[in-house]
Amino acid sequence: MNDNKIKSSEIEFKDRLVSIQRVTKVTKGGRTFSFSAIVVVGNENGVVGYGLGKANEVTAAISKGIDDAKKHLIQVPLNKGTLPHEQTGKYSGARVFMKPASAGTGVIAGGAMRAVLESVGIKDVLAKSKGSSNPHSVVKATIDALSQLRDPRTIAKMRGITLNKVFNG
């Protein structure tokens, strides 16, 4: 896992609402309703983050989620609009698999994964979500997979060899 956290100060973000739940707390005075929202933010150029917001109103929950997402940003290496290599990720019961695709394929991914991948700026990818379909777990598993991605320059630098040697071995 690489330490690719970044600051959110001067970057323009687009936010996507992944899911919103109405949760109920039963008290002796009756039921109290509140809302929980999971939001993904990204600049569509390799930076993405997710956040959870909880509040008594939907709009407040979403804005809290956006603020939380901006605090948990990661940098993702992209290769011509797709991934540098295949990658799996997991969180709790959710497992995700992502594979680079040729230009023109599009984002082949389901609900929660699609929001994350589009926010990163990936244009062509084949992705599969296995196990739990809980949006919270799927988003975290996808972020886990994206945070494990490495580009050839990083690998060459880490091993102390030239870029040609990475490919030609």
Image (cartoon, rainbow, N blue to C red):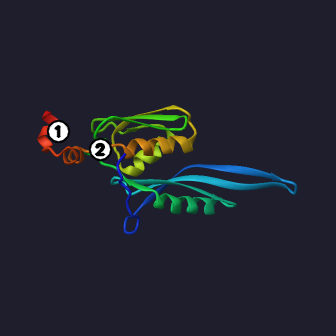
Q: Position of residue 72 (x, y in %)?
A: 46, 57
Write the residue at 16% across / 36% down.
Answer: 167
Residue 60 shown left or right of residue 3 in the figure: right
Determine whether the residue tagged by mark 1 lies in a helix, strand or loop.
helix
The circle drawn on residue 122 is: none
Question: Could you tell whether 47 is left or right of 113 in the image?
Answer: left
Report the quarter where the C terminus lies. top left
Q: Amino acid at mark 1?
A: Val
- Quarter holding the N terminus is top left
Give the secondary structure at mark 2. loop
Decide: few, some or many residues near mark 2? Use Cα within 10 Å; few <14, some 14-19, many ≥20: some
Residue at image position (17%, 38%) is 166
Residue at image x 20%, y 48%?
A: 157
The numbered disc on residue 166 is 1
Distance Cα–Cα, label 2 vs label 1: 12 Å
Task: State yes or no: discs 2 and 1 in contact (Cβ < 8 Å).
Answer: no
The percent coordinates of residue 26 (x first, y second) are 81, 51
Q: Which residue is mark 2?
A: 150
Asked where in the image residue 126 lies, by quadrant, the reply is: top left
What residue sits 46% from the left and 61% below the top? 70
Amino acid type of the residue that numbered disc 2 sits on in the rendered structure: Arg
Q: Please tell me which residue lies in front, 32 or 164.
A: 164
Q: Residue furthest top?
A: 131
Asked if residue 87 is positioned above or below residue 157 in the image, the reply reads above
Dot 2 or dot 1: first in sequence order is 2
